[in-house]
């Protein structure tokens, strides 16, 4: 079975981001970029499935500028077999990404696509679900555990109120939650080996997909600074404040 | 110096390993005054990080020294000085001469396990009567049959309590002090080796610094590194990496302290404004960051020359000198702006203040660096004229 893992190049999670002065977006100049952490979990899960003998090949796919190739190299250094870069300088929206991935699935015919549940830059949490709908494949989102046996995939999902397990026929779509695994760091020998692994380049045009945005960003602002709280001595005082000052009871 | 995407990937791996396997435990190790060297080194070894520029046939990666520099820089993110120092002893102080001059057999026996992280190494140069003045060491290794018999002792031995073997510098002959010394791989479980004590220091708590005695310790002569009588020369070459390592390891540690000081002083208010808003404070931070970048450039230049095959004693000595001094300057300036909090024990800045002080002493004191630089500038008075 082939596993496809879409990965996104995003601002590193350690970076304290700043909104551009003109409010059109986040300042990405000289900012460290890394693989979306949820996607790292997806790569790790694919590698574990391969190590367990359930998968034969892992293809890491990224959609973005030329530098997204570095993100693909990270996946290759972790253990993916080859990469595909769909090169575009427009910031692809989830529906565009899902359409591009659908086109790629038609070429690659993976048995399983594992995606991060969301990217930490825009937190859309849509791509996996849209891809499943477009392909009409079953989906197991927010996975915290995968178990593959006799052609069926059991996905344990983190839902409000507990864990739910669904059984999917393959091919299927899975999106990862934080607790699925702890991604490995690439060893130095594997980093050097990754240099030799192939990365194919494609364009959205060649796949017949229009990447023009359908959404318009009106304004980007920083979240309001949190005001410091007050300490209350008794429950009575709390209730009084909630009733008379805040007015919510 | 040009860093490739592979250098960046290596940095990322080191950062993740430090974040996950080292930093969460540093406070405990500092309190226990010991860190589990074998456990930590095994993790580094498995990630291929203990032999970055060591030969491939013994488990190394065979990459040039710029990769080792990239790794060393990231080790500065460890939240203490002791653990990176122990790693540096393993990769850049106890093993360079062995990798360069050791026989295949010797490398199989000592270098390969050090690269794999199965063995912990230490370097035995300093003695009670000789540290920076390496030529004056007193430990002897006399030939007896097919063996060397070693007598004497070593002091300030980093990793000394936990190490499996020592790269030992000993006198093997009577002649001139620069030509009578030999490097020997000494397994520390050998009879006659005793760890006299673990030293109590003002910093670097998690590091096991030992005093070690040798009483008629017998090792086969095939444990000799390279040629007999060349030990001083090998050690001087080995010092290039040790000194570059020392200066490099301080860069990110200094930057972290500057950054945390900026954060702290931004939040802390006095006399109606943040401490940071005082020009003396934000100017000082800018000044220090500028100095760190200047040191980084000096180091990169030295590394570039070293990768190109040049002897970099001059630039490496300068980097070590400047690194030691700058660490003291950064530590003192930053601690000051933390006020009372800076004087508190469990604070990164105060730990850095204690740990960083060693840089001007270990691996050749500042004054020895100045002597070397003067010698190369032709300004050191000869002994006859003094």
Image: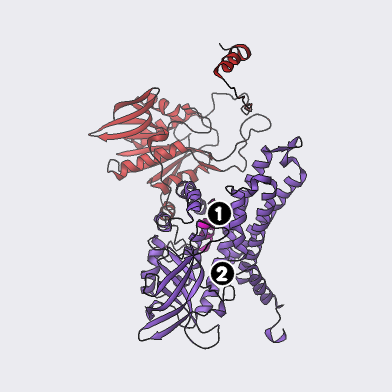
Chain colours: A red, B purple
Q: In this rendered view, identify the residue nearer to me: B208 or A45.
A: B208
Cα gap from disc 2 to disc 1, whole angstroms: 19 Å
Tell me, yes or no, if residue B17 can be seen here: yes
Apparent side of residue B94 relative to residue B132 in the rendered image (left or right): left
Check disc 2 and report the residue beneath it.
B240
Q: Chain of mark 1?
A: B
Is residue B378 positioned above or below A158 on the image? below
Q: Chain of mark 2?
A: B
What segment carries the magenta color? B59-82
Q: Residue furthest left?
A: A150
Check disc 1 and report the residue beneath it.
B76
Tell me, yes or no, if residue B12 can be seen here: no
Residue B241 magenta-highlighted: no
Residue B311 % position (x, y): 58, 72
Apparent side of residue A14 relative to residue B143 in the rendered image (left or right): right
Q: Residue at x 46, y 66 (%)?
A: B160
Residue A103 % position (x, y): 40, 32
Q: Are marks 2 and 1 in contact (CB under 8 Å)?
A: no
């Amino acid at each position: 079975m082939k596993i496809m893992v879409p990965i996104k190049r995003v601002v590193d999670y350690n970076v304290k981001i700043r909104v551009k002065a003109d409010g059109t977006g986040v300042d990405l100049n000289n900012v460290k970029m890394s693989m979306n952490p949820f996607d790292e979990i997806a790569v790790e899960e694919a590698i574990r499935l391969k190590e367990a003998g359930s998968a034969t090949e892992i293809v890491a796919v990224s959609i973005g500028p030329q530098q997204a190739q570095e993100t693909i190299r990270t996946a290759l250094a972790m253990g993916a077999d080859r990469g595909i870069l769909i090169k575009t300088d427009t910031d692809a929206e989830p529906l565009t990404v899902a359409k591009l991935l659908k086109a790629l699935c038609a070429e690659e015919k993976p048995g399983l696509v594992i995606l991060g549940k969301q990217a930490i830059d825009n937190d859309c949490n849509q791509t996996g679900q849209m891809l499943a709908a477009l392909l009409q494949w079953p989906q197991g989102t927010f996975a915290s555990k995968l178990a593959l046996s006799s052609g069926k995939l059991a996905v344990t999902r983190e839902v409000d109120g507990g864990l739910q397990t669904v059984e999917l026929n393959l091919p299927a779509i899975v999106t990862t939650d934080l607790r699925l695994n702890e991604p490995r760091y690439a060893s130095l020998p594997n980093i050097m080996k990754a240099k030799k692994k192939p990365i194919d380049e494609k364009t959205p045009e060649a796949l017949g997909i229009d990447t023009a945005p359908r959404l318009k960003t009106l304004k980007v602002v920083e979240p309001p600074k949190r005001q410091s709280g007050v300490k209350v001595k008794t429950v009575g005082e709390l209730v009084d404040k909630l009733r008379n000052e805040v007015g919510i009871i | 110096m040009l860093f490739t995407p592979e250098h960046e990937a290596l940095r990322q791996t080191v950062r993740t390993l430090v974040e996950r396997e080292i930093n969460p435990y540093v406070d405990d190790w500092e309190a226990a005054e010991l860190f589990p060297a074998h456990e930590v080194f095994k993790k580094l070894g498995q990630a291929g990080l203990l032999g970055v520029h060591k030969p491939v046939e013994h488990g190394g990666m065979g990459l040039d020294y710029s990769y080792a520099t990239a790794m060393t820089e990231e080790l500065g993110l460890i939240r203490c000085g002791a653990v990176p120092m122990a790693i540096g002893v393993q990769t850049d102080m106890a093993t360079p001469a062995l990798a360069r001059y050791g026989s295949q057999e010797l490398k199989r026996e000592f270098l390969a396990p050090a690269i794999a992280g199965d063995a912990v190494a230490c370097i035995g140069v300093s003695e009670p009567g000789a540290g920076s003045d390496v030529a004056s060491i007193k430990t002897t290794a006399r030939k007896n049959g097919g063996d060397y018999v070693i007598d004497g002792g070593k002091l300030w031995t980093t990793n000394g309590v936990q190490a499996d073997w020592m790269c030992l510098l000993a006198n093997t002959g009577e002649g001139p002090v620069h030509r009578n010394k030999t490097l020997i791989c000494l397994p520390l479980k050998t009879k006659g080796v005793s760890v006299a004590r673990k030293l109590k220091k003002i910093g670097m708590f998690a590091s096991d610094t030992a005093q070690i005695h040798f009483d008629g310790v017998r090792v086969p002569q095939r444990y000799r590194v390279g040629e007999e009588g060349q030990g001083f020369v090998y050690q001087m070459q080995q010092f290039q990496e040790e000194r570059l390592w020392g200066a490099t390891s301080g860069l990110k540690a200094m930057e972290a302290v500057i950054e945390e000081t900026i954060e702290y002083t931004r939040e802390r208010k006095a006399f109606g404004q943040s401490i940071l808003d005082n020009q003396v404070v934000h100017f000082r931070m800018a000044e220090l960051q500028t100095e760190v970048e200047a040191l980084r450039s000096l180091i990169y230049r030295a590394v570039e020359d070293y990768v190109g095959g040049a002897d970099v004693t001059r630039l490496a000595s300068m980097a070590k000198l400047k690194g030691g001094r700058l660490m003291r300057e950064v530590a003192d300036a930053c601690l000051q702006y933390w006020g009372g909090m800076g004087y508190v024990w469990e604070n990164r800045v105060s730990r850095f203040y204690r740990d960083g002080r060693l840089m001007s002493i270990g691996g050749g004191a500042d004054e020895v660096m100045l002597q070397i630089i003067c010698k190369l500038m032709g300004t050191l008075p000869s002994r006859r004229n003094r």
